[in-house]
Amino acid sequence: MREIQVEEMKARLVEMVKELNRICEENGLTLYMSGGTLLGAVRHKGFIPWDDDIDMYLIRPDYDKFIEIMRERNKTDRYKLCEHKLQNEYIYPFAKYIDTRTLLVEKGGYAGVQMGAFIDIFPVDGLGNSVKEAKKQMRKTNKYTVLNLARLVTPWRKNVSFVKNFAIACLRVISDMFGSDKLLAKLDKQIRKKPYETSKYVGEYIDEIGEKRIMLKEEMYSGYVVLEFEGVKLKAPVNYDKWLTQFYGDYMQLPPEEKRVKTHDYKLYDLEEE
C-alpha cells in the first residue's frame, strides 16, 4: 500500500465533500460546514493551514433522512456512510463519510470498523425552549457521552497521565457493562427527548457538551449562506459570524504558533496502489 501524504489527502477530502454536498442537494437536504471547516472557509477560503479534516452538520431531520439515503448507496458507492444504524460494530455517536479505497490507521482511537479517509457529519439536535432547559438537557446527555468517549480511545495511552488513563479504564469497565448497542441507544433516546422541530434552542452536542454549543435555531438554521472552501461552494449557517464568535471568540485572529498543530494522529494509505 502507498502512504498518502497530507496535501493529497486534503485534495481527496475536497472531492469527497463535493460528492457529499451533491447527494444532499439532490435530496433536498441542507449540509452545513462546521467547526474548523467553517472557520477555514471564512478565514482562509479553505483548510486552516495546519488542519487536516472536514467537519459538516445536518439538522437532525435531515441527518436521519441521509442515513436512509445512504443505506442503499453503501452497497455500491465508492464512498459509504459509517453510522451505528448501518454498521452495528461502529461505535461513534455521529456519522463518518469514508472513502473505501483508502485505509486509515489512527493512534489512540478506535471506531469499531475499518476506516478510510473521512468527513465527520454531526447532527444538530434540539435543546428545548430556554437556555436553562438546554443546559439541563446537556447535563442529562453527558453521562452517556462520557461513557461512550471512554470506548473510543485506546486505554493506557502513552503521554497521558496515570490519573486520566485510570479514569478512562474505570469508565470503560462501566461502558462495557452496557455494550455499544445499549449505550448508543440510550444516548440516542436521551438526545431526542428535545425534538429539533419543537425546540427554540438547538446545537451539536452528541459528542461534546458546553454552553458555546447552545444556539438559537431561528438565528442559525432559518437559512444559509454559501461560502468558498478550496474552490467548492458550500453552505454555512445564515448567522455564521455569531456562530464562529460563540465558538472561537476573535476568530479572525490567528492562534499562537505553538497551537498551530494538526488535530489528528493517523496515517492514510491507498488500497489500490502497492
Image (cartoon, helix red, strand yellow):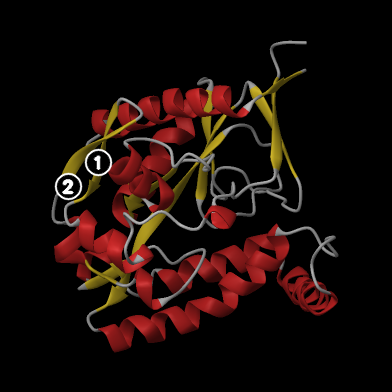
Helix, strand or loop at label 1? It is strand
Above or below for 223 versus 217: above
- Tell whether 200 sits left or right of 22: left
Q: In which quarter of the image is the N terminus?
A: top right
Residue 214, percent across and down? 32, 72
Q: Could you tell me if the residues under marks 1 and 2 are in contact, i.e. CB atoms within 8 Å?
A: yes
Q: Which of 250 and 32 is in front in this view?
A: 250
Gap in angstroms between the C-alphas marked 1 and 2? 6 Å
Query: Disc 2 designates what residue?
Result: 224
Residue at coordinates 70% horizontally, 40% vertically from top-left? Answer: 266
Q: In which quarter of the image is the C terminus?
A: top right
- The amino acid type, in three-letter code, at marker 1 is Lys
Residue at coordinates 43% horizontally, 79% vertically from top-left? Answer: 138
Which label is found at residue 235? 1
Residue at coordinates 76% horizontally, 47% vertically from top-left? Answer: 107
Which label is found at residue 5? none
Helix, strand or loop at label 2? It is strand
Residue 42, percent across and down? 28, 45
Residue 92, percent across and down? 59, 54
Q: Nearer the viewer, residue 184 or 139?
A: 139
